Image: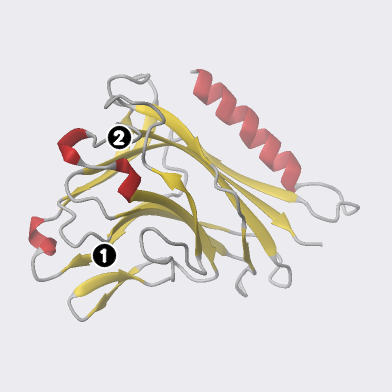
Amino acid sequence: MKKLILWTALLLTGLMSACKDSDSLNPVFISNAAFELATDGWVADFSGYSTDSDSVALQRTALRSRLPFGLDTSQYAFLVQAAPNSNDQLFMYLKKVVTGFNPNVVYNISFEVTVGTAYPSGAAGPGGVSGSNMFLKAGASQTEPNKVLRNTIYEFNLDKGIPSQEGPAAIILGDATNGSGNSAYRLSTKTGSKSISVRPNANGEIWLFVGMDSGAVGLNTVFYDRIKVFLVAQQ
């Protein structure tokens, strides 16, 4: 209930920020999803796996779920998990389109993402998976993020960089470690230190994506508790 009340307050704040009067030179638009009632337009997909073996062996789960034991199980989140990561390049991502922007304006976009994971800092977590090899990335583009088949690999169609590095379309917010020394689920908020600049497409749309770019073999599990995106028009 507390998260729902906070979500409602932040949503109203975002709406008021997006509706500033014409004297405002750089209005702030806020997309805020807490997943308590729905997925708020966020859709999951996976890339970085092979059609030769992984299409059958790779087990994928993406759904709105209650938070796991150790956290507040009365609250909901967006669960994304997959195994095995045999190619060490699995990208498990959520995407969403936001609309109503001026195609002639460039927007600076920053992210604040709260995730629930059980990967301790400095050690392996459940199944021997190291959260330090799972990189939380966020990005934006004029075009829809998708997986595309190249040769036998489903690749991500935007340049997000290799797992441990950023690309032109994505920034790294942090890794999947939970900020503790225990293999128990903890919530941690990742913000990174950068923003990404994007001009909307001709329809006034900006596509957003958030995901784990993983070099960790084994079961990769992430609960997205909240995704906040700030879009600020450049002056």
Label 2 Cα crowd, 10 Å radius (few <14 / some 14-19 / many 20+): many
Give the residue displayed 41% in from the left and 30% down from the top.
Answer: 179
The alpha-carbon separation of the residues under discs 2 and 1 comes to 22 Å
Q: Is residue 179 visible?
A: yes
Name the amino acid, label 1: Gly
| Residue nearest the observer in this picture, 5 or 213 | 213
Q: Nearer the viewer, mark 2 or mark 1?
A: 2
| Residue nearest the observer in this picture, 144 or 170 | 170
Residue ID for mark 2: 119
| Residue nearest the observer in this picture, 103 or 147 | 147
Name the amino acid, label 2: Tyr
What's the mark number on residue 9?
none
Q: State how many labels appear.
A: 2
Residue 128, how many percent across, how many down? 17, 39
User: Where 154 falls versus 69 (above or below)?
Assistant: below
Residue lying at the far bottom of the rendered structure: 151
Q: Is residue 50 left or right of residue 41?
A: left
| Residue nearest the observer in this picture, 120 or 89 | 120
Give the residue displayed 27% in from the left and 61% down from the top.
Answer: 89
Give the residue displayed 77% in from the left and 47% down from the top.
Answer: 19
User: Where 202 falls versus 77 (above or below)?
Assistant: below
Q: Is residue 187 left or right of residue 154?
A: right
Q: Is residue 208 visible?
A: no
Residue 139, how many percent across, how many down? 51, 59
Residue 92, how many percent across, how many down? 31, 53
Sequence order check, earlier mark of 2 and 1 = 1
Residue 25, how many percent across, how many down? 85, 56
Give the residue displayed 8% in from the left and 60% down from the top.
Answer: 56
Say which quarter of the image contains residue 26.
bottom right
Residue ID for mark 1: 48
Q: Quadrant of the C terminus?
A: bottom right
Circle 2/circle 1 CB separation < 8 Å: no
